[in-house]
Amino acid sequence: MSSRGKTLSLDNINPNAIKVEYAVRGGIPAAAAKYEAELDQGKKLPFDSIVWSNIGNPQQMPNLAQPPLTFWRQIAALTEYPALLDAPKETRDALFPADVQQRARELLDAFGSVGAYTPSKGVALVRKHVAEFVEERDGYPENIENIYLTAGASWGILTLFQALFRSGQDAVLIPIPQYPLYSAALSLFDLEPLHYDLNPDEQWRPSLDNIREQIHRAREQGKTPRAIVVINPGNPTGACMSEEEIQAIIREAYDQGLVIFADEVYQRNVYQTECPFFSFRKVLLDYGKSSNEEERRMSEMVELVSFHSISKGYSGECGRRGGYFELTNIDPQVEAQVNKLVSVSLCPPTQGQIGVDMLVKPPRKGDPSYDLFIQETQKIHDTLEQRSETMAEKFSKLPGIHIEPAMGALYLFPRLHLPKKAWEEAKKQDKKVDELYCRELLDETGICVIPGSGFGEQPVQLEDGTSHSYFRTTVLAKATDQFVERFIKFHTAFMKRYED
Amino acid sequence: MSSRGKTLSLDNINPNAIKVEYAVRGGIPAAAAKYEAELDQGKKLPFDSIVWSNIGNPQQMPNLAQPPLTFWRQIAALTEYPALLDAPKETRDALFPADVQQRARELLDAFGSVGAYTPSKGVALVRKHVAEFVEERDGYPENIENIYLTAGASWGILTLFQALFRSGQDAVLIPIPQYPLYSAALSLFDLEPLHYDLNPDEQWRPSLDNIREQIHRAREQGKTPRAIVVINPGNPTGACMSEEEIQAIIREAYDQGLVIFADEVYQRNVYQTECPFFSFRKVLLDYGKSSNEEERRMSEMVELVSFHSISKGYSGECGRRGGYFELTNIDPQVEAQVNKLVSVSLCPPTQGQIGVDMLVKPPRKGDPSYDLFIQETQKIHDTLEQRSETMAEKFSKLPGIHIEPAMGALYLFPRLHLPKKAWEEAKKQDKKVDELYCRELLDETGICVIPGSGFGEQPVQLEDGTSHSYFRTTVLAKATDQFVERFIKFHTAFMKRYED
């Protein structure tokens, strides 16, 4: 008899897959899911519900920080079931405004059926609307062939990292702290991550010196730096970049021969007016009007990929998986390869594509749907702003917590100053101190947040034995007893438990 | 001034991406898309429309071989826009049967909002329904943790190949002819493809000798064969495997230490009763009841991944991207890695997940939606069967074409016996003879089919200078003047043009 064991084991599967870490859906959220299942089964725990604050999921129950927009969902329903458009006029007019019916018909014309494959880059009409949107935003026309619709921004980033970079050789600059998709993608494709610091004492501004150091080090080690990732507005930091900061990154990319990956999925989540959103594309193309010849050349040479998503902003439509990326200054032969690779996944989900159409072409003033749309988006804006401010304000009053109000995005990223004994206890448990903190927070309150180390921001022990570390929380939970009061009680007890 | 050129060029992007070929969305479909755009612009061509027969896209216009199922689309509409469930009872009952309303409420309970991320494996309720479906089909219970919902079968295959196999070392057996997703995935992840033949003269039965030869050769070259892909019912061949053939593959996998990837997305597309569909899972688990100890052991040892999809079958819902894979006998530590990797893509699209729910739990006898559902699916079945038969019958009468009626799937895969001069002309144009044939077919008629070489089935020149080659056509186009008559005219002219 054969003594054959299993074919697949941890020893012989893809070692790069094993290296991947993805904290926002990692150990702490997994423990939270287990608690939630236990609560459902009637088990007694120190809390009666999980407060999910681990991931930007604005339509998640019971927070529902962002109820779905009526305009979006009406169009989704009509494109799914076009028979509703053939219902008696009185019935359908009672259910759907005229502009919604018209838009649904236009989309059905373009899609045929939402059950059919579309072109791999997405339906041309939607890409046309994206091109019009970026033209209106940036002031420069766009060719629809530069637009690729995707199943969310993450999918686009994974696909492009895989298409464009060489395993074991190429290196990519990513900010620290970062969104862990980037480090996960680099591990998976065996690419070298080059960490550049964002400075917490200067509103998380990127350090250019640090970027240059990292590039130098990588080259010395025989690696080839090929790209820089910038997240603006920042995740997890919530920082918004000024035009000057963006210019500095573009110059650096030009000098060092780097492709820029601009993750701009939070472009509509901006909560202040001093530092509005500038797209990398606009700042890059503005150089084309410079009187300086080298700057004009820069504008034509620097390769840029910009990402946008329906999962954030006012829509928060994470579940339908939609977004797009836009290629600027990419060599046509390289683009042909991207096009081919994208086709292997056939096409992005049709309701994700329709979502992109809503994102870039919302109702206009005078349309029957306009007033309700404005009312709903304004309410979402106010809710997010208010939850973010209340949380930041209450956190800032706690000893051992330092916090800057977020300028944008959906998160707060408070700094913890924890006592020496907490560091020692973490060490004893073979954990990082921020992991200890977040795990005890979950165990005692049911609040699920992610340690800063999950974003690459490692805890640091200070000379006196105390430590600095971070955690990220979304601002989506109701900022009442559900979250803030439980949190304050926990934090106070934690500081006392580990005090000297 | 910097003389910096572009950073990305064909010379320095991922060479594995460049190697990828994907004929079903490759050069010929691209040429067809160009013609279609020209026709739209009013250009005169030798035909007035493109007949898309390159990919199994049943809801594509204008073929629309499979109109969407009312039950599916009503539930999609209600889950997208739950306000319809709050419409006055009279209105909503006029639009939606009671079972549809109830099912939509049940799904909304499970999903919360379809705009929210779900667990990365998919919503538990849907996975529970999948487990019940496979239990009913195979006679063995299933644990919902073995079920992973996906954005279509392709996505699952790409993700698992990447998670489980080691670049530059591992080898995977794929049938020839095959669906080009497999060769594309192997190129992209730098895995060694081991081609095993399906024998056209024995209803495309796999050759076990050939499988063993390939494994032997790979081991001699220092590669590690890890898995075998089986497509049943076959794509492009349309062949259905008997229970005995499946048993033979399972034994071989056991002896050789191979994981089985069973692509069973056409399990509902079966057009005869002599050789019904057997799932690999059922045949594998049946060995558990054997009186032979080694067979029982086999049943517990052989690792199997089974794939299913909403894109084929009676639903043909390609655009929403939904499907699932099911793990059997996979080591729990390996499964944990799969789970982690899947989480990096966040979650499958929610309407794809809801589609899976419809796929595995259609209306039951006595439900208000049942009669219409049966009527619609029966009509789809009849349409596909009739188009497939008419096409096969008309093709079979043409000189130089040999064809077996398909037992299942959505395709015909006719063999061409072409004159010597066609081979010579192809050589002159630096093409394969099947490419020459398909390209001239497109140029003269607007019919878009894929050369057999796109599926790995290479043309062969015979001793007398003539050749054998293949092409794949879907059976989705109307089998009337739109397709068959244009085709016959072309084929007759082609044979005459190149006759000796």
Image (cartoon, coloured by chain):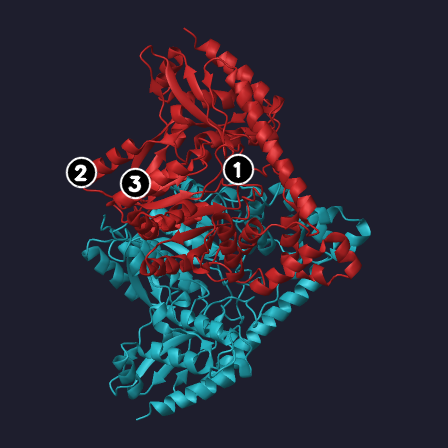
Chain colours: A red, B cyan
The chain under label 2 reads A
Against A315, residue A34 (above or below) is above
Residue at the extreme front of the image, as rendered: A291
The residue lying toward the viewer, choosing from B317 and A142, is A142
The residue lying toward the viewer, choosing from B470 and B430, is B430
State the CA–CA distance, disc 3 to disc 1: 27 Å
Numbered disc in front, either 3 or 2: 3
Q: Is residue B363 visible?
A: no
Which sits earlier in the primary sequence, circle 3 or circle 1?
3
Q: Is residue A390 left or right of residue A285?
A: right
What is the x, y in percent for residue A382? 62, 33
Instruction: Give the residue type that dot 3 points to.
Output: Glu
What is the x, y in percent for residue A94? 77, 53
Which sits earlier in the primary sequence, circle 3 or circle 2?
2
Q: Which residue is mark 1?
A: A269
- SS for dot 3: helix
Do the residues indicated by labels 3 and 2 lie within the same chain of the protein?
yes
Q: Which mark is residue A252?
A: 3
Instruction: Give the residue type that dot 1 points to.
Output: Asn
Q: Which mark is residue A220?
A: 2
Q: Are marks 3 and 1 in contact (CB under 8 Å)?
A: no
- SS for dot 2: helix
Instruction: Give the residue type that dot 2 points to.
Output: Glu
The chain under label 3 reads A
Residue found 31% across the figure and 73% down from its top? B458
Q: Is residue B157 left or right of residue B81?
A: left
Residue found 43% across the figure and 67% down from its top? B235
Q: Is residue B67 left or right of residue A216?
A: right
What is the x, y in percent for residue B294? 36, 50
